[in-house]
């Protein structure tokens, strides 16, 4: 009998397999799981077997993030990173120190600020000028749908009071019509097209930094939600190819090729070419990312009814559908016929409906295929559209960390959605009861990539320990999902979306040994402690890719 290379014993095993959700031991040989269960494993321990004593802590399938931006997150860490700060004063102090310490950089770059730190969510160029001087500065906010720029950047880009808003964005202006320093959505492109290009070496460094960070949370696979030239970071595709070729890519990655909303169906040959080129090792680009709308906080999320003015009265703005429905209804069937998965961004209820309609068109034209289209974010979903996820086979890709009361929700969202739409937000419970496939992701660097923090929020509808931004009640608690459902979404659900479910996502004999050891059994404590759990060890094909100091 061949002995195992690696054995886990002495603690609970969450298999994410509905047939056998709990076990007590796992054996690994040659990078694959060869036995599950105490009786099956005990005879496989030999003199060279590494035995990991769980000591009551839980073993799970490796987490899979179904919507994340690791290269951009790594770049933020290399630049002026504001992600861990919360106030305008902290931002300005950090930016000022960074500018002083990097006098040779042509542009001052960074990001990660929160809209709730500024009145109306819109910081000013004047404030940034005071700490950056005459060098241009460009700082996307944490959700990537707006940017804070200084006067030098506005000048370099030629943006003034006479500059028109682009069709897919807005220049924030003062009372006199002059640009005030915040650029929304497509207006960011007026500046970021001028940024210096990041070399491949720098993008690869950012990828590996981001990968180490994700592994530290137990994440073994992900879907990069934008592979293409977008924002201020460049195309991460070549960095993935380099890391895959030299063996430094230890995660499994599906790339979502960017659908350029300024173009139409003529870009399909380019997307097909990139799918062929962007393939190697653990990286494959088989999805296409369609960003259908913006975000609610800057009134660009696409809504069925107009936004309110904060006093319960409708305005004349119902947001932006970045891809015209008639184009979407043609593009999605074509992509579906070519075997692409479509990864939609949809925040508003109109955007969600437009994405579902496009999939319905694809089914009518092509029949039901196994491309596993999914809609990410799903902030506002009209109740009539909830059952359509199951009916159309569209996965609900949850960023559940956001389903909570916090200042941005309270000050910049609820007053402008009004009733009843405010109660239609993040309807994970309804989607689960309707039988939708649930997948999960973080959207890092928009928010923390910690799966346990997101899972905590999905279960409690309150922020996890260390992520609170005030004292609030549970947010729409009727939309909570249980711990097992949330863990399964972050493992088996995301593996299904990534077409990796035949080899990962559950702990079963024959699956690859992509695994994570938590520091506790989250089922054993109270629900309000779920988010305190952390990853101690992370394994990919039985090889340890992360270990905490106290592991």
Image (cartoon, rainbow, N blue to C red):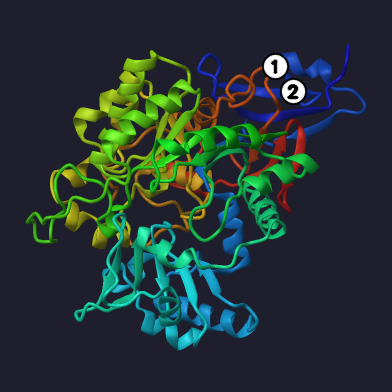
Helix, strand or loop under label 1: loop
Q: Nearer the viewer, residue 153 or 462?
A: 153
Q: Which mark is residue 510?
A: 1
- 115 sits to left or right of 523: left
Identify which residue is drawn at 14% across, 45% down.
305
Classed neighbour count for the residue bearing mark 1: other residues with Cα under 10 Å, few (<14), some (14–19), many (≥20): some
**Whole-percent x, y for residue 316 in the image:** 11, 55
Q: Pointers 1 and 2 in contact (CB under 8 A)? A: yes
Q: Which image quarter is the N terminus in?
A: top right
Residue 283 to residue 413: above or below: above
Q: Nearer the viewer, residue 279 or 384?
A: 279
Residue farthest along the front direction in this orientation:
266
Residue 152 to residue 198: above or below: below
Q: CA distance from mark 1 to mark 2?
A: 6 Å
Identify which residue is drawn at 93% across, 26% down.
47
Classed neighbour count for the residue bearing mark 2: other residues with Cα under 10 Å, few (<14), some (14–19), many (≥20): many
Identify which residue is drawn at 48% across, 65% down.
192
Q: Which mark is residue 237?
A: none
**Whole-percent x, y for residue 75 in the image:** 60, 60
**Whole-percent x, y for residue 348 in the image:** 27, 44
Q: Nearer the viewer, residue 114 or 479?
A: 114
Identify which residue is drawn at 54% across, 24% down.
16
- 30 sits to left or right of 75: right
Q: Please tell me which of labels 1 and 2 falls first in the chain.
A: 2
* Residue 388 in view in this figure: yes
Residue where numbered disc 2 is placed: 32
């Amino acid at each position: 009998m061949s002995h195992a290379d690696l054995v886990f014993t002495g603690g609970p095993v969450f298999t994410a397999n509905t047939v056998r959700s709990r076990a007590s031991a796992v054996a690994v040989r040659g990078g694959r799981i060869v036995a599950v269960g105490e009786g099956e494993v005990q005879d496989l321990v030999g003199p060279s077997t590494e035995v990991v004593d769980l000591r009551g802590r839980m073993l799970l399938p490796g987490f899979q993030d179904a919507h994340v931006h690791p290269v951009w997150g790594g770049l933020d860490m290399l630049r002026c990173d504001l992600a861990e700060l919360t106030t305008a004063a902290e931002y300005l102090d950090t930016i000022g120190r960074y500018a002083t310490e990097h006098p040779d950089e042509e542009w001052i770059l960074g990001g990660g600020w929160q809209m709730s730190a500024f009145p109306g969510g819109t910081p000013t160029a004047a404030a940034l000028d005071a700490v950056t001087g005459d060098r241009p500065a460009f700082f996307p906010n944490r959700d990537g749908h707006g940017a804070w720029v200084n006067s030098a950047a506005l000048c370099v880009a030629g943006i003034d009071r006479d500059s028109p808003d682009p069709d897919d964005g807005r220049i924030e202006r003062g009372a006199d019509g002059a640009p005030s320093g915040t650029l929304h959505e497509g207006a960011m492109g007026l500046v970021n097209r001028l940024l210096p290009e990041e070399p491949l070496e720098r993008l690869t460094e950012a990828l590996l930094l981001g990968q180490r960070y994700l592994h530290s949370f137990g994440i073994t696979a992900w879907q990069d939600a934008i592979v293409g030239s977008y924002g201020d970071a460049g195309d991460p595709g070549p960095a993935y190819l380099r890391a895959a070729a030299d063996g430094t890519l230890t995660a499994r990655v599906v790339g979502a090729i960017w659908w350029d909303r300024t173009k139409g169906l003529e870009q399909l040959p380019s997307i097909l070419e990139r799918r062929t080129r962007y393939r190697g090792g653990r990286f494959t680009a088989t999805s296409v990312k369609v960003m259908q709308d913006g975000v609610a906080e800057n009134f660009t999320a696409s809504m069925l009814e107009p936004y309110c003015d904060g006093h319960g009265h409708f305005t004349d703005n119902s947001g932006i559908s970045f891809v015209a429905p008639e184009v979407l209804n043609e593009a999605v069937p074509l992509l579906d016929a070519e075997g692409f998965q479509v990864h939609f961004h949809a925040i508003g209820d109109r955007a969600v409906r437009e994405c579902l309609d496009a999939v319905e068109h694809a089914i009518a034209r092509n029949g039901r295929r196994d491309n596993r289209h999914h809609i990410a974010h799903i902030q506002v979903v009209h109740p009539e559209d909830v059952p359509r996820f199951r009916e159309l086979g569209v996965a609900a890709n949850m960023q559940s960390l956001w389903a909570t009361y916090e200042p941005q929700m309270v000050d910049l969202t609820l007053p402008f959605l009004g009733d009843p739409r405010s109660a239609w937000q993040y309807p994970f419970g309804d989607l689960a009861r309707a039988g939708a496939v649930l997948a999960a992701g973080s959207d890092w660097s928009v928010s923390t990539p910690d799966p346990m923090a997101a899972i905590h929020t999905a279960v409690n509808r309150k922020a996890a320990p260390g992520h609170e931004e005030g004292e609030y009640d549970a947010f729409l608690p009727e939309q909570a999902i249980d711990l097992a459902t949330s863990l399964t979404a972050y493992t088996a659900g995301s593996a299904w979306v990534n077409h990796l479910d035949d080899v990962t996502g559950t702990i079963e004999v024959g699956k690859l040994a992509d695994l994570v050891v938590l520091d506790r059994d989250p089922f054993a404590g109270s629900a309000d402690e779920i988010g305190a759990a952390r990853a101690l060890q992370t394994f990919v094909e039985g090889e340890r890719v992360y270990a905490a100091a106290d592991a």
